[in-house]
Amino acid sequence: MAKQQGSTKERTRIFTHYPKHYKVLMHNDDFTPMDFVVAVLINVFYKRPEEAERLMLQVHEQGIAVVGIYSYDMALSMINKATSLARDAGHPLRITYEPE
């Protein structure tokens, strides 16, 4: 007589971890023109003109503003692009990031 083999079920647990998000912060300085900051917000961070102006005024009045929340790679890429544009134009624009 042949032995019957029992069936066993294997449990697999799948853990998904979403990537951490980072806040991109723009800091105020006395040398970068407001229209340049608005242009950076529109062209690098893809903000609408109204929102770019609002963020620029927030940076100017409060000293700092969150301009977006992105994954690490996107945050770093946008910061590098904006900083490069500012340095090429001779402006000391400061943009940083911190974990959300």
Image: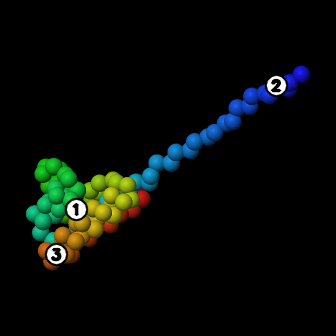
Residue beneath the point at 19% across and 52% down: 47
Q: Label 3: how many residues lie within 10 Å, few (<14), some (14-19) or many (20+)?
A: few
Residue positioned 28% across, 68% down in the render: 80
Question: Among all residues in the image, which is located at the extreme right?
Answer: 1
As drawn, 66 above or below 2: below
Please report whichever mark, 2 or 3, sits nearer to the chain's N-terminal start.
2
Residue that numbered label 2 is attached to: 4
Check the picture and name the quadrant holding the C terminus. Answer: bottom left
Cβ atoms at labels 3 and 1 below 8 Å apart: no
| Residue extending furthest toward the left | 35
Q: Are marks 2 and 1 in contact (CB under 8 Å)?
A: no
Vertically, is 5 above or below 93? above
Residue 60 % position (x, y): 19, 63
Residue 14 on image: x %, y % = 57, 42
Could you tell me which residue is drawn at 80 percent across and 28 percent down?
A: 5
Which of 30/73 is in front? 73
Q: Quadrant of residue 36?
A: bottom left
Query: In this rendering, which labeled residue sits more in front, label 2 or label 3?
Result: 2
What label sits on residue 59 in the rendered view? 1
Note whether residue 88 is visible: yes
Label 2 – label 3 distance at C-alpha: 76 Å
Considering depth in this image, is 14 or 21 the residue closer to the camera?
A: 14
What x and y, as percent, mark residue 22? Answer: 38, 57
